[in-house]
Image (tube, helix red, strand yellow):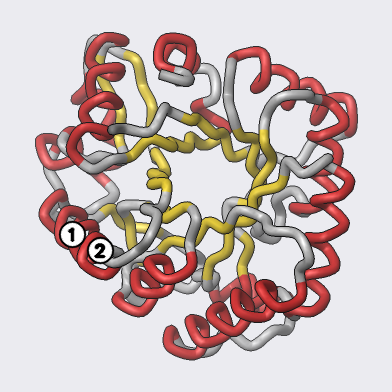
Amino acid sequence: MSRPFRFGVNLIDPAPAAEWRAKCRRAEEIGYDVILVPDHLGMPAPFPALVAAAAATERPRLGTFVLNAGFWNPALLAREVATTQALTDGRLELGLGTGYVQAEHDRAGLPFGSPGARVDHLRHTVEELGRLLDTKVPLLLGGNGERMLRLAAEHADIAAFTGAYLAPGNTEGKLVPTTLDEFDARFARYRELAADRAEPAELNLLLQMVAVTDDPEAAVRPLVDRVPGFTVEQALELPILLVGSKEEVTAKVLALREKYGFSYLTVLEPHLEAFAPVVAELGGK
């Protein structure tokens, strides 16, 4: 039996207090189930932003999407999580990742480390949080690599998929979409690794674009032009792009749940309003 849909919005733009409260209330008014904050330099600081979101809203849960474990000492992070969980009346969901933007580590004067070292630190962080926190906070983990898929299969209450990978050699965090075949292969591998779980994880997908339009090709053309060898046809079949009429976009959301089990979908702040009709039609169903 499919899980009911949950929809989240990742608020990426810093704002003064009144503006921040207003956009959080707008997300609640539309019907979003989760208000999320990322963990990048130049974007809102996650925990104070979530406490402010909690004060401005009543219903949505509040989450990090996702914390860069490389920015955090596990013991200090446990304190932040426990305090935020208390100040949001238990509405917190904790998303964690390895971090992928080397330039941010350089600016912060923090080591970036190899991919393996970053996964090691994330695993250590997850294990320490489990030991240090008195209260259970739902944990979201996601990634494409074998070790990240295994970690998510072992520990995540919510397993997240982005459908993108870091452009080779890029230090600024430029992401390149996977092909549909690559996405399906990574998802199938997660399913294999998670086959023995007592309780299946909730499955999350980060949507990179939502465009309700009668000209889908024009909408995805700017993305296609930035990825050598990528075609419009390949772009339109990707799970992470919702482009088309309202009916087509809604049908694709239903198909994503039917094919993969994705019941928790996250959009980026620029698409908050574009996704509103889907939230209104499918929220909680």
Q: Secondary structure at mark 2?
A: loop
Residue on which disc 2 sits: 195
Q: Residues within 10 Å of mark 2 (few under 14, many from 20)?
A: few
Which of the two residues, 138 or 25, is positioned nearer the viewer here? 138
Q: Earlier in the sequence, mark 1 or mark 2?
A: 1
Q: What residue is drawn where x is 89% and y is 32%?
A: 17
Quarter residue 265 falls in: top left
Which quarter of the figure is the C terminus placed in?
top left
Query: From the viewer's perspective, is 107 left or right of 152?
Result: right
Where's residue 52, x and y in %?
85, 37
Residue on which disc 1 sits: 188
Q: Residues within 10 Å of mark 1 (few under 14, many from 20)?
A: few
Residue type at tag 2:
Ala
Residue type at tag 1:
Ala
Where's residue 238, x and y in %?
21, 41
Quarter residue 94 falls in: bottom right
Closer to us: mark 1 or mark 2?
2
- Distance, label 1 to label 2, CA atoms, is 10 Å
Where's residue 226, x and y in %?
29, 49
Which quarter of the figure is the N terminus placed in?
top left
* Whether residue 260 is situated above or below residue 4 in the rendered picture: below
Q: What residue is drawn where x is 49% and y is 27%?
A: 271
Q: What residue is drawn where x is 35% and y is 74%?
A: 150
Q: Residue furthest front?
A: 198
Visible residue check, residue 274? no
Where's residue 123, x and y in %?
53, 80
